[in-house]
Image (spheres, coloured by chain):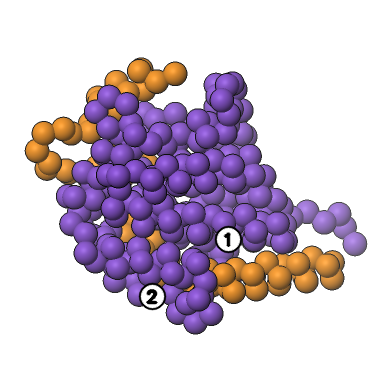
Chain colours: A orange, B purple
Amino acid sequence: MKNHTRSKLSRRNFLIAAGVGGAATAAAIAGRALSPEEPKAVASNDKRRGKGYQETAHVRSYYNTSKV
Amino acid sequence: MSASVTPLRFQPPEVPEDKAREGYYALLARLFYAGPDAALLAAIGGAGRIAGEGEQSALGGAWNRLAAAARAMEAEAACLEYDEILVGTGKAEVTPYASYYLAETGREKILAGLRGELLGLGLARSEAAHEPEDHMAGLFDVMRHLISLGSEDAALQMQQGFFDRYIARSYPGFCGAISKSEKANFYKHVAHFAESFLAVETEALKVF
């Protein structure tokens, strides 16, 4: 048990030293801009108004057929 | 003492560092699934610098440069960049599928194994997604989910196992390929940040 506590602390300390801890606020703010439940659904919802090439669900399924 | 059972579910992470990891995986999942919109760029750009001890760290530097790039970047240009590098007309310059980086042959087996694991975790790709499950964005999203289950040993073990099997050996090739792309500008910074963060993850998941 003692070892667990110590290793947990060292994991956290490592993360903090690496900047992950310091980045908590940054991550939270950035994360809020997402839909955390389903980030994968984001792309299909966005309304891109680019000219020319458009990546649509149809295009994506086509790519999938051309893979492998 | 009764047999010790570690409950996995419905335990939100109480560890702030894990909350941060969750946020970063969510961000990486989003940025590698599609180009950012203006709101996301503004959020990254406005999120502030990584301060304190992290300032000197590779992660801090990579984040601060990504934030600066987000402030300078137009969403439309970033999306175009994403499509040119990771979707492409015809063959994508950089493939976002992990199995490509994990093995020369037998990629279907990797994908099949991954599908089995996801099923075991009660996960499946969203109906809107047509990509195979080994898309890097999907893998990052699974990590986000696993971290959200808690910071107990069993939860960390699941994170470590999944990370080791699918991410640890695929991200260097993936991020490296984006960094080398002549079309990459904003995504160079995204790749560099991903690389720095995942290098930290590689070490951190060894020490628990």
Residue B200: mark in rendering: 1
Q: Position of residue B65 (x, y in %)?
A: 36, 66
CA–CA distance in space, label 2 to label 1: 18 Å
Q: Position of residue B174 (x, y in %)?
A: 46, 42
Please tell me which residue is depicted at 38% across the width and 70% down the height of the picture. Answer: B64
Quick check: can you spot residue B51? yes
Task: Give the chain letter at badge 1.
Answer: B
Amino acid type of the residue that numbered disc 1 sits on in the rendered structure = Val
Please tell me which residue is depicted at 41% across the width and 66% down the height of the picture. Answer: B63
Mark 1 neighbour class, 10 Å CA radius: few under 14, some 14 to 19, many 20 or more: some
Amino acid type of the residue that numbered disc 2 sits on in the rendered structure = Arg
Q: Which residue lies furthest to the left in this view?
A: A51
Q: Earlier in the sequence, mark 2 or mark 1?
A: 2
Please tell me which residue is depicted at 70% across the width and 51% down the height of the picture. Answer: B157
Compared with B199, B139 (above or below) is above
Quick check: can you spot residue B134? no
